Image (tube, rainbow, N blue to C red):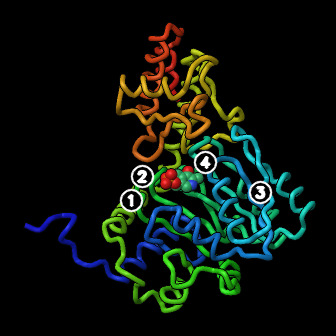
Amino acid sequence: MTHPFLDLAPLSAARFAEIEDRVARLLDTRQDVVIMQGEALLPLEGAIRGTVGPGNTALNVITGPYGQTFGNWLRDCGATVIDLAVPFHTAVTAEQVREAFAEHPEIDFVSLVHAEAATGNTNPVAEIGEVVRERGAIFYLDAVASIGAEPVLPDAWGVDLCVIGAQKAMGGPAGVSAVSVSARAWARMAANAGAPRRSYLSLLDWKERWVDGGRKVLLHAPAQLEMLALEACVERIEAVGLDAVMGRHVAAAGAARAGAVALGGGLEPYVYDVREAAPVATTLRVPAGTVASELVARALEIDSSVPLAAGGGALAKEMIRVNHYGVDATRSAVGASLAALGAALAERGVSVDLEGARRVVEAG
Ligand SMILES: *Cc1c(COP(=O)(O)O)cnc(C)c1O
């Protein structure tokens, strides 16, 4: 008997290239798409280290924890870093980016996170892309939490380095990820003396040995199971249509937001402006005197199947995350999450409207 995971035929270079092409179609891009053999942090770090060095000035937009990480890598590369931080419950505006360029015309690299699952906000990438393009800077985007939940269009938006992972709204594996690279970004990397070469972090290695060679020979044995899972995940999205998948996330986010308000008990959306709320996940603020991580722990005891988490780090006290993405991008997962939270609040003597929340979530 052959084992379904273990006794697989080798993954051919042609099949690998075909999976890259399917991911490129999902992004509606004609840029080179490289699938990297690791979690999304691999292309996120590889793209920064490949493109940025001493002499560069980077505008690092911080709307959540990932922006902070990127700033550290940028400084590590020797760049001058200008941090543009906004409160985690809002989005950055194109106007703020325009002002940063006016103040620092030497900016030649912009890093931005599209949507942050960790904070529940989403940024207006199309508008920001216009500003970045006017100024001719390289535009780097973390679209890991947005792809599958809302449109991600690197070509239309002028994104030079667009990183995605399949583990959030795509409902796929976490062990491989992809980056689309514009011709301008490749040129910057080729000219960057400090860009990783002959390294697992190196995008240039993939450019020179895979892309330029007509994608005939892989650099090393691919992560076969993860590649097959990514292929299956893209196939599943293609079968129902990307719009339908995004629609499920938008509906789940709307239900979570309205349902939490209907539930009451002092819960309120963490991101106040609905236009700045990400469809991938909804974050909630807990009432004063309640510790979010304790409330979530109790809700998970009541129903361990719900996609609830407390905020990370310092946000653990005040923030609840309803991670309604992937398989959980449904009204029923949102309804069960709010029911568990409502039950945990009721136990503490807080008055909640469980029935009202249920009706709102089902009606949309
Ligand atoms: C989830 C996520 C990633 C990937 O990180 P993991 O925590 O390893 O899943 C990267 N960037 C953003 C914005 C994310 O939300």
Frontmost of labels 3 and 4 is 4
Q: Is residue 118 above or below residue 264?
A: below
Q: Is residue 338 above or below residue 128?
A: above
The disc, 2 or 1, on the residue closer to the chain's N-terminal end is 2
Q: In which quarter of the view is residue 331 placed? A: top left
- Using the image, tell me which numbered label, if any, was put on residue 116: 4
Q: Which residue is mark 3?
A: 127
Q: How many marks are shown on the rendered structure?
A: 4
Q: Mark 3 Cα within 10 Å, few/some/many (few <14, many 20+)?
A: some
Q: CA distance from mark 2 to mark 4?
A: 16 Å
Q: In which quarter of the view is residue 107 placed? A: bottom right
Front residue of 120 and 189: 189
Q: What's the amino acid at mark 4?
A: Glu
Are discs 2 and 1 less than 8 Å apart at CB?
yes
Q: CA distance from mark 2 to mark 1?
A: 7 Å
- Using the image, tell me which numbered label, if any, was put on residue 233: 1
Image coords of residue 190 (percent x, y): 66, 86
Frontmost of labels 2 and 4 is 4
Look at the numbered disc 4 and give the secondary structure of its residue.
Answer: strand
The answer to whether one can see residue 148 in this image is no
The disc, 4 or 1, on the residue closer to the chain's N-terminal end is 4
The disc, 2 or 4, on the residue closer to the chain's N-terminal end is 4
Q: CA distance from mark 3 to mark 4?
A: 18 Å
Are discs 3 and 1 less than 8 Å apart at CB?
no
- Using the image, tell me which numbered label, if any, was put on residue 171: 2
Q: What's the amino acid at mark 2?
A: Gly
The disc, 3 or 4, on the residue closer to the chain's N-terminal end is 4
Q: Mark 1 Cα within 10 Å, few/some/many (few <14, many 20+)?
A: some
Quadrant of the frame with the N terminus? bottom left
The disc, 2 or 3, on the residue closer to the chain's N-terminal end is 3
Q: CA distance from mark 2 to mark 3?
A: 28 Å
Q: Mark 2 Cα within 10 Å, few/some/many (few <14, many 20+)?
A: many
